[in-house]
Amino acid sequence: MSTMHPQPLRAGAAPVLRRAARVLLIDARERILLFRAEGDFADGSAIWLTPGGGLKPSESYARAARRELWEETGLDAEVGACVWTRRHVYPNRGRLEEARERFFVVRCAPFEVDRTHWEPAEAADLTAHRWWPLPEIAASDEVFVPRRLAALLTPILRGEMPPRPTDCGI
């Protein structure tokens, strides 16, 4: 996770590539863990997103997903299938970034999030977390990443994994 505070962008700057891994963390009660990120977003001042973050040099997406899961939640778990990909260009800390993300499924028992290993930027930007049931996501006016999260989660919760990762959109 990186901060999303508004700063002026340099005119004509090309986006900086940011490869990232995200985790669809689903508990035994079929809820998904999401973090509320505060910032200056196209859809408003806050979004709800899955645990995850940028890859380190020479790190695989799957390894980054496991590391980010542990850093952001305290849970050390094997990651399952990569089910979605996402490509998105956005402003971040005065520069334009192009995120290329992969989403992995992890099933777990309910637990309390451990923030011990959070970076200062995460502590500043991630203002809340919540285990969301699918019907509440579908009925909410909140902004989720990806935007079609409720529709995309429906087959995943039924155990229907795509044969190869699909583009989940913005």
Image (spheres, helix red, strand yellow):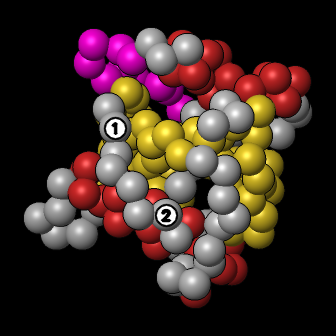
Question: Does the magenta run of residues contain 67?
Answer: no
Reading the image, the residue beneath label 1 is 80
Answer whether residue 39 is visible to the viewer in this image: no
Q: Is residue 14 above or below residue 73?
A: above
Q: Amino acid at mark 2?
A: Leu
47 vs 138: above or below = below
Say left or right for 122 vs 132. left
What residue is at 37 percent from the left and 27 percent from the top? 83
Of the two numbered discs 2 and 1 on the same chain, state the one appearing first in sequence: 2
Give the residue displayed 25% in from the left and 57% down from the top: 63
Q: Which residues are magenta?
A: 161-170
Q: Quadrant of residue 139?
A: top right
| Magenta stretch, overall SS | loop
Instruction: Estimate the x, y position of residue 78 in percent, counting from the top left.
Output: 33, 50
Give the number of the disc on residue 95.
none
In the image, is 110 to the left or to the right of 120? right
For disc 1, the neighbor class at 10 Å (few under 14, some 14 to 19, many from 20) is some
Q: Position of residue 71 (x, y in %)?
A: 46, 72
Q: Position of residue 73 (x, y in %)?
A: 56, 66
Residue 75 bears which disc, if any?
A: 2
Secondary element at tag 1: loop
SS at badge 2: loop
Residue 64 shows in this picture:
yes
Q: Residue at x 26, y 18 (%)?
A: 164
Taking depth in this image into account, of 81 and 108 the one nearest to the observer is 108
